[in-house]
Every structure is written in C-alpha cells, then in structure tokens.
Image: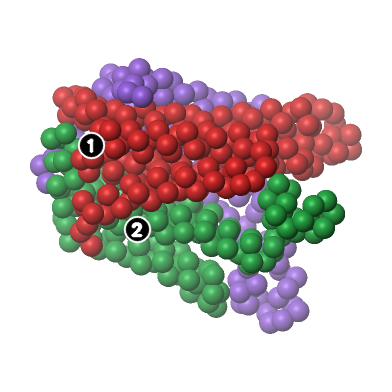
Chain colours: A purple, B green, C red
Amino acid sequence: MAKSTQLIDNEVFRAFATYTAIVLLKMMLMSLITAYFRITRKAFVNPEDTEAFGKGESAKKFLRTDPDVERVRRGHLNDLENIVPFVGIGLLYALSGPELSTALLHFRIFTGARIFHTFAYLIPLPQPGRGLSWAVGYSVTFSMAYKVLKTAWLL
Amino acid sequence: MAKSTQLIDNEVFRAFATYTAIVLLKMMLMSLITAYFRITRKAFVNPEDTEAFGKGESAKKFLRTDPDVERVRRGHLNDLENIVPFVGIGLLYALSGPELSTALLHFRIFTGARIFHTFAYLIPLPQPGRGLSWAVGYSVTFSMAYKVLKTAWLL
Amino acid sequence: MAKSTQLIDNEVFRAFATYTAIVLLKMMLMSLITAYFRITRKAFVNPEDTEAFGKGESAKKFLRTDPDVERVRRGHLNDLENIVPFVGIGLLYALSGPELSTALLHFRIFTGARIFHTFAYLIPLPQPGRGLSWAVGYSVTFSMAYKVLKTAWLL
C-alpha cells in the first residue's frame, strides 16, 4: 500500500482530493434537494413513486412537473456539465507538478464559484450573478487544461 | 512504464479498477437499451433518425416520446448523477490507503446497489425498492468521501 | 512533488492526459454553443435570464424551447454519457501498462470519433453518420475496459 499512500502524501494531490470531494458532495446534495421538492410539491415522474399518495386516478394527479423541481434538476445537470471536466482535468493538473499556491488558487476559486452558482440558481439571484459564477468556474478549468496540455502534450 | 504498472499492482487499486469498469460498462449499457426501445417503439427525437422509416410526413409521426424510452433515459441520467461521484471519490479513496477488506466492502455494495437500481427502474419494481437501492449507493459514496477528507484534508 | 512528476513523465499517461484534456474541452465547448443559440434564438428556460430583453409580459415570450438549442443540449448530454466512461476507464487503462502505440490508437480513434459525432449532430449529417461515430467511440471504450479487467481483475 506504500505506493498509494505516497500519492496522497503529495500536498497538491491532497488539496485536489479535498476540493474534489467537496464539489462532488455538493453535486450529490442536488439529488436530496430534488427529492425534497418532489415530495413537498407532490410532483413525480414515475407512476410507482406516487403510490404512497393514493391508488389509481387519485395518484395520477401527482405525475406532473413543478417549476421548483425542474430548477433544481437544471442546476444538477449544470453541475454535471461543469464538475466532470473539473475533476478530470483537475486530476491531470494535480499530477502535472503545479506550485501548491497556484493549485490551491485554482481549486478554491472553482469550488467557491460552483457553490455561489448553486445559490444563484436556487434562490434565484438576478442575472448576471449565475452567469458570471458559471464563467469563473469554466475559466479555472480552462486554465488547468492549458497547464496540462503544456506539460503533457503527446498527440 | 514501471510507475503505472506499480499502481495497478496495488490490490485496493485493482479492486477499484475492476468495480469502476463494471459500473461504467453498466452505465454504457443504458445507451444500448435506449437505442433498442427507440427502434422497437419507433420513437425518435432527431428528424434525421426517422428517415429509414419513410420520407416526409410519414416519418414525422415517429418524432415522439415513448414512456419506455423516457424511463431508460431517466435511469441513465440517474447513473450519471451517482456513478460520476463514485468514480471520482472512489479513486481518491483507493489512493488514501484503506484496508483491502473495507475497500472491497464499499465497492461491492455500491456496484450491487446500482445494478439492483437499474432493474428496479426498468421492470419497474414497486417503491421503496428503487429508492432504497439509490440510498445505499449514495451512502457508500458518502462514506468514502469521509475517509478521503479525513486522510487528505488540505483546504 | 517527485511522485506526480513521475506519473506525468510516463508516455502513455501523457498521451491520456493530452486526449482527455482535448475531449473534455470539446465537451465544455457545448456549453458555449448552447449559450450562443439561446441568445441568438432568444430561447431561455429561466425567467431571470430573459430580463435583459424586457420586463413582465414582453419577456415571457422568450421562455420557450428552440429546436437548435435542444439539439446542442442533446449533443452535450450524449458527450457526458460517452466521455465520462472514456475518462474513467481510460485512466485505468493508461495505468494498466498498455503499449504506447496501442494506447495512442485507442485515444486517437475515440477523440476523432467524438469530434466527428459533434459535427454530425450539429450540422446535422444524414444517418448513419452520427450513429456510426457513436458506435466507434463506444467500441474503443469497451476495448479499453476489456484490457483493464484482464489486467486488474480483483472482485
């Protein structure tokens, strides 16, 4: 087990592990928020999910879309579209030998931007709040990809 | 190539590689099931996909949604939402030096829960079968994230 | 930082890093294309996004779906469904000690297939162009998964 312990002893890798766990847990939280809104708004998509609320016709009225549920689901999909590239490119970036301070700057800004993005989406805040936080996270991932390609380039 | 060979020689990492390949292949299978239902139910979303079934107006009637197709697509999206955190956090977990038996327990329960979840979604089984299998997989990823943050924490 | 520098010095890993960064950047590009079509077609989904185009009733008419926007979004979701398994399985594959030439063949074909798939989806090209490019990328990931399971198998 020596090998893996060594990688996790690398400070940049530890920082990557910490921030990746945080943003992935934040993304997972969207599932719970979706479930919360589906249950409180009684808005489901699968017939078998409504059976606790009555049988037959009385249950069918809960098979509907709700604006709050759809909003959380859009936030969740946006997380997938942005956090997946962060995790993939961030892992390669962490292994490309960046300075710890530079790496921390990237990870911290991305994580802060995505947490702000979630609040901006769910409250919702007026634009361009959500748009800007999206752009900040996007730029951080782009900057890490530039470093990865500069270090690793082998086509 | 010595370095990479060494990492794959680590037993925890080998177990992670095995179960990750299995759950990602299971997720990829959802694409084939979607294609199967789209073709057998003749329910497409892109006009260019219906051309094999006739030209002009006669093809347009195949541009429609089908309950079975939509059900598989929801299962596929649920896989993305849950398997992406498992792969990302699981990789960090595998590198954080867990006991092999503990790691195997995590990987096996997650993989079993997601396979059961797919059957529960597609058959469909009555609730709370699908909900419980979702919660089991979610809890396993959460438990691995706790270990990662405890081992690697560097904010 | 010696450890991480060593992994990135491995040629197969460098090739994986290069192609992974390329396909993830390509996937991120879909967000910009979606934003471009949303703004030029004036087709939004969040009420707060339409406020730049007028207040009250005059803004509500921009809350609509547009076929071009939906097409890009389907391409983006298809990327997520296929590029996530490539990145996860590809990482394990790169660490399983393949020949550089074999690894490059896998990474190049997958990357070419996904770039072609995006053009085929957005232009759109007549089928089976898009379907075949999807199948080629799918098969490459499957082939890498086979190598991973053969090398790492520990259930």
The residue depicted at 46 percent of the width and 59 percent of the height is: B29
Instruction: Please give the chain letter of the residue carrying mark 2.
Output: B
In the picture of the structure, the residue carrying the numbered disc 1 is C99
The residue depicted at 60 percent of the width and 50 percent of the height is: A73
Q: Nearer the viewer, mark 1 or mark 2?
A: 1
In terms of image quadrants, where is residue B69? bottom right
Q: Is A43 on the left-hand or right-hand side of A93?
A: right
Mark 2, secondary structure of its residue:
helix
Query: What separation in Å lies between label 1 and label 2 (alpha carbons)?
Result: 23 Å
Horizontal and vertical percent for residue A54? Answer: 68, 80
Query: Between residues C57 and C112, which one lies in front from this camera angle?
Result: C112
Q: How many numbered marks appear?
A: 2
Kindly indicate whether the residue at mark 2 contacts the one at mark 1 (C-beta within 8 angstroms): no
Residue furthest bottom in the image:
A55
Position above or below: B23 against B2: below
User: In the rendered image, is residue B83 in sight?
Assistant: yes
Instruction: Please give the chain letter of the residue carrying mark 1.
Output: C
In the picture of the structure, the residue carrying the numbered disc 2 is B22
Amino acid under disc 1: Glu
Q: Residues within 10 Å of mark 1 (few under 14, many from 20)?
A: few
The circle on residue B90 is none
